[in-house]
């Protein structure tokens, strides 16, 4: 058909890469069937006989072309919006600011629109969004159908930071779009800019105290943070604490949550729920028995989430049944009201999952649609169970917020730094609640510099879905995280720029041959991230250790985002990077939270585990590189007079931290695993199929468990902390 765009043109118009660079840096073409599969998942018609895209006409009124779903701009920017509107004198444009005040916009120069206006829209459809979510249009018979005109609107450069609305009335119809004004750059808190800081990092589930119910929880976070604060630390960084699927077997990987809005109820400390004091003596004894069962799990060498939750859920249900005070009822009611947009959908999904299992595709068809009458009836029928799931979210949020208050009161300048996962698990709550927002038959992958790809098992959210709701979902994720922290770290921040999508099922043996990049509006996503951080007085750290694109790092630096730097990076061939060459605006550590601990790299103990779990395809070459890296690292430390080649592993780990302390970076991070001398792989960056690695509690050099109580009195830990504290 004449005028039908080619596959390449369609891909370019929708941000789908048709060429990528392989491990040697050479460009290679993406298979056409992969490009077509990705485009189809985005809702783009790719067949040769498909009609060219045209603007929608509602009720005989020509659509307003050129009005984006959302406008996200930096402060002082003056963007021009070019609109094609019906030729009518009834035209008005204004911005309604967040505080309700009005900024009128003047109608600019008016030109005749080209005759083929519809084909120039490049697939952008106009959604007529009124304040109430409905179109505000005249009857079709009253529409002005004269020739359209092109109008320029220049937005003023003095709009305040915040969430505003652009309202345009033309042709008897009012169009409303969000306008978000974001900070040009993130400003460091004055006390942090004046004095560098340091902190500790680890996975919360792995840090168990003697009072834990088999897993690290919010109270353990407060304990770890206040102890570190009294040693001079400014922050404690933990992995995501979001909810996994609520049914066994619970996914242990915190970077694969069912929802980034919901918190993990496993992190609740039962004894710190206020209503526990109102249990009867018999009920209190039952809770104690459940606690005894769970605390015995502290002695195991794996974190058994299913067994922990069986005990913890039973105890929490008893506490939930206690009548709350008037004050607590009001607080819970306020929480429910403020979180109404997602909370009861999530709670309902949990209850259905507990009854029918997962995935949701196996549920009765009428329950697969969250807006169906049957789901509403199910929610009503199981109202008490649904309320319990909502109550768990309230309690978990309150305990994490308490942890932040405690560590700040203990002297931390930043407090808790939570990680945000790069996405949600395929087939989880968010796909059920907002199926139209996700690309069918696509999964999110991670592509390394050498071209290898890992399927992360995460659902692929459409870029258009984020824009169509004014990025409200992303804003809410960031806002909820900052409500309980003083900083956040965005894991794999490169996914806010572009994502590697893998069609499912994939026929290719190598995931690198079965996927391609999809572009996202990073200006909008990073801007909203900075706006929320600005309002919370918080810090943003980029989880960009694996980022391969220099322009992304440059962009983040321009926006003032703190990068993540890893000292034990062998790209320079010397076993590590030169700490004095590391960036100043960075949070620097010896390695990521889920990378092999320093002692493992020095002893080579991680190599056996890599072989056992099949973590490397080229294991012989990996072992050879690791041995050369270890030798180079020990030689580098000896050459600087920090240690001797025959020094003990503990002394070498201490020397590594002295080496780290010479970095000019704003923040230095000490891993919990290095504080206790752990020599095992605790998690593995990018590995999703080996669950055993994500079930390991903190342990010492002999692989026996180290409780939080022992950590806080550890001579080894004090020795490492003394080094980084002297640097600050």
Image (tube, rainbow, N blue to C red):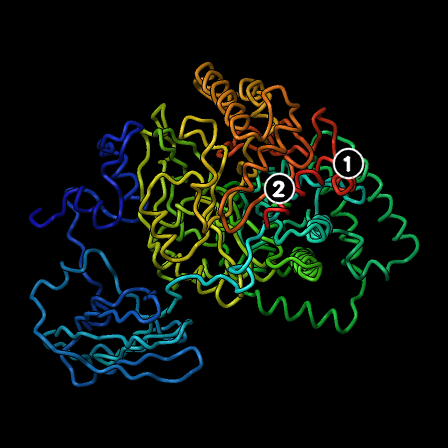
- Depicted 71 relative to depicted 299: above or below: below
Residue 298 badge: 1
Residue farthest toward the right in the current orientation of the protein? 281
Asked if 285 appears above or below 137 in the picture, the reply is above
Q: Nearer the observer, disc 2 or disc 1? A: 2
Observer-nearest of 69 and 402: 402
Badge 2 marks a residue whose secondary structure is: strand
Who is closer to the viewer here, 304 or 160?
160
Q: Quadrant of residue 574?
A: top left
Q: Position of residue 289 (x, y in %)?
A: 86, 43
Q: Is residue 75 left or right of residue 606?
A: left
Q: Percent x, y for residue 348?
A: 59, 55
Q: Which residue is mark 2?
A: 202
Residue at (50, 27) in percent of width and height = 636
> Does the rendering let one see residue 10?
yes
First-in-chain label (2 vs 1): 2
Residue 138 visible here: no
Estimate how packed mark 1 is, as few (under 14), some (14 to 19) or many (20 or more) residues with alpha carbons within 10 Å. many
């Amino acid at each position: 058909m004449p005028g039908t765009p080619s596959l390449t043109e369609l891909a370019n118009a929708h941000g789908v890469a048709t060429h990528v660079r392989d491990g040697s840096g050479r460009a290679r073409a993406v298979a056409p069937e992969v490009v077509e599969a990705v485009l189809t998942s985005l809702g783009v018609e790719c067949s040769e006989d498909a009609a060219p895209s045209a603007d929608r006409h509602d009720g005989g009124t020509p659509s307003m072309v050129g009005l984006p779903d959302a406008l996200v701009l930096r402060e002082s920017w003056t963007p021009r919006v070019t609109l094609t509107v019906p030729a009518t004198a009834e035209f008005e444009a204004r911005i309604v600011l967040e505080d309700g005040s009005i900024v009128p916009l003047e109608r600019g120069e008016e030109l005749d629109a080209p005759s083929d206006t519809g084909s120039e829209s490049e697939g952008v459809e106009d959604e007529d969004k009124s304040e109430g979510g409905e179109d505000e249009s005249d009857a079709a018979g009253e529409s002005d159908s004269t020739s359209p005109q092109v109008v320029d609107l220049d937005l003023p450069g003095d709009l305040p930071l915040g969430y505003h609305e652009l309202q345009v009335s033309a042709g008897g119809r009012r169009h409303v779009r969000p306008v978000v004004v974001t900070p040009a750059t993130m400003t460091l808190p004055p006390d942090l800019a004046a004095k560098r800081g340091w902190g500790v990092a680890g996975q919360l589930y792995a840090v168990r105290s003697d009072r834990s119910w088999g897993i690290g929880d919010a109270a353990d976070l407060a304990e770890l943070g206040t102890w570190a604060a009294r040693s001079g630390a400014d922050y404690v960084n933990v992995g995501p604490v979001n909810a996994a699927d609520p049914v066994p077997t619970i996914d242990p990987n915190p970077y694969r949550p069912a929802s980034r809005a919901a918190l993990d109820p496993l992190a609740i400390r039962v004894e710190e729920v206020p209503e526990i004091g109102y249990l009867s003596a018999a009920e209190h004894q039952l809770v104690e028995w459940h606690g005894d069962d769970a605390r015995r799990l502290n002695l195991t060498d794996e974190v058994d989430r299913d067994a922990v939750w069986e005990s913890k859920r039973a105890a929490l249900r008893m506490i939930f049944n206690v009548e709350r005070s008037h004050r607590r009822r009001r607080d819970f009611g306020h929480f429910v009201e403020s979180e109404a947009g997602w909370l009861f959908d999530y709670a309902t999904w949990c209850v259905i999952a507990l009854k029918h299992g997962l995935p949701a595709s196996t549920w009765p068809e009428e329950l697969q649609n969250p807006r169906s009458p049957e789901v509403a009836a199910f929610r009503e029928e199981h109202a008490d169970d649904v309320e319990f799931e909502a109550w768990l979210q309230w309690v978990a949020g309150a305990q994490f917020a308490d942890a932040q208050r405690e560590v700040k009161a203990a002297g931390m300048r930043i407090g808790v730094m939570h990680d945000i996962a790069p996405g949600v698990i395929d087939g989880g709550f968010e796909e059920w609640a907002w199926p139209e927002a996700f690309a069918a038959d696509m999964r999110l992958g991670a592509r390394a510099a050498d071209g290898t790809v890992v399927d992360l098992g995460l659902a692929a959210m459409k870029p258009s879905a984020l824009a169509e709701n004014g990025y409200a979902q992303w804003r809410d994720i960031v806002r909820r995280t900052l409500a309980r922290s003083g900083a956040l770290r965005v894991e794999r921040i490169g996914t806010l720029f572009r994502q590697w999508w893998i069609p499912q099922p994939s026929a290719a043996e190598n995931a690198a041959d079965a996927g391609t990049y999809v572009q996202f509006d990073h200006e909008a996503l990073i801007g909203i991230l900075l706006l929320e951080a600005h309002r919370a007085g918080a810090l943003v750290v980029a989880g960009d250790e694996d980022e391969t694109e220099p322009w992304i790092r440059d962009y983040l630096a321009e926006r003032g985002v703190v990068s993540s730097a890893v000292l034990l990076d062998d790209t320079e061939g010397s076993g590590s990077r030169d700490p004095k060459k590391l960036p100043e605006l960075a949070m620097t550590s010896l390695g990521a939270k889920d990378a092999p601990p320093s002692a493992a790299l020095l002893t080579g103990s991680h190599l056996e585990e890599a072989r056992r779990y099949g973590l490397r395809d080229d294991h012989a070459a990996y072992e050879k590189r690791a041995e050369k890296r270890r030798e180079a690292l020990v030689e580098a430390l000896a050459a600087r007079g920090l240690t001797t080649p025959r020094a003990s592993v503990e002394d070498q780990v201490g020397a590594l931290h002295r080496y780290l302390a010479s970095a000019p970076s704003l923040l230095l991070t000490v891993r919990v695993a290095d504080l206790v001398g752990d020599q095992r792989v605790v998690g593995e960056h990018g590995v999703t199929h080996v669950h055993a690695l994500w079930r390991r509690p903190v342990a010492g050099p002999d692989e026996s468990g180290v409780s939080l109580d022992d950590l806080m009195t550890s001579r080894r830990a004090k020795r490492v902390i003394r080094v980084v504290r002297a640097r600050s």
